[in-house]
């Protein structure tokens, strides 16, 4: 089961969260930019869970 890599912060609607960007998520995959996450003390306003760094996809080097 893959994560849904959302491209917008749910708080400020920033559209600059490509899959390799720094972002924070909760267990329900609510997604926030780092600035908004820090402003909310890394607590998801939807579920009350912890916001942690979103994993980034593996880089593939062209052969």
Image (cartoon, rainbow, N blue to C red):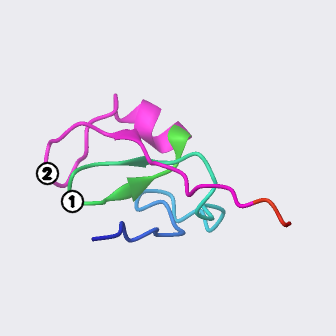
Picture residue at 54% right of the left edge, 38% below the top = 35
Numbered badge on residue 47: 2
Numbered badge on residue 28: 1
Q: Earlier in the sequence, mark 2 or mark 1?
A: 1
Q: Are marks 2 and 1 in contact (CB under 8 Å)?
A: yes
Taking depth in this image into account, of 41 and 55 the one nearest to the observer is 55
Going by the image, does 46 lie left or right of 56? left
Q: CA distance from mark 2 to mark 1?
A: 8 Å
Q: Residue furthest front?
A: 63
Q: Is residue 30 above or below residue 35?
A: below
Locate residue 12, reporting x and y percent: 50, 58
Main secondary structure found in the magenta portion: loop
Taking depth in this image into account, of 13 and 21 the one nearest to the observer is 21
User: Where on the picture, by quarter, is residue 61?
Assistant: bottom right
Q: Which residues are magenta?
A: 35-60
Q: Residue furthest left?
A: 47
Picture residue at 63% right of the left edge, 65% below the top = 18
Q: Residue furthest right?
A: 63
Locate residue 29, reporting x and y percent: 30, 60
Q: Is residue 1 above or below residue 37?
A: below
Picture residue at 54% right of the left edge, 52% below the top = 56
Picture residue at 27% right of the left edge, 71% below the top = 1
């Amino acid at each position: 089961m893959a994560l849904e890599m959302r491209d917008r912060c749910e708080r400020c609607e920033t559209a600059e969260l490509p899959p390799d960007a720094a972002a924070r998520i909760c267990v329900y995959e609510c997604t926030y930019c780092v600035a908004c996450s820090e402003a909310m003390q890394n607590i998801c306003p939807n579920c009350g869970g912890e916001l942690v760094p979103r994993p980034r996809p593996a880089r593939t080097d062209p052969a």
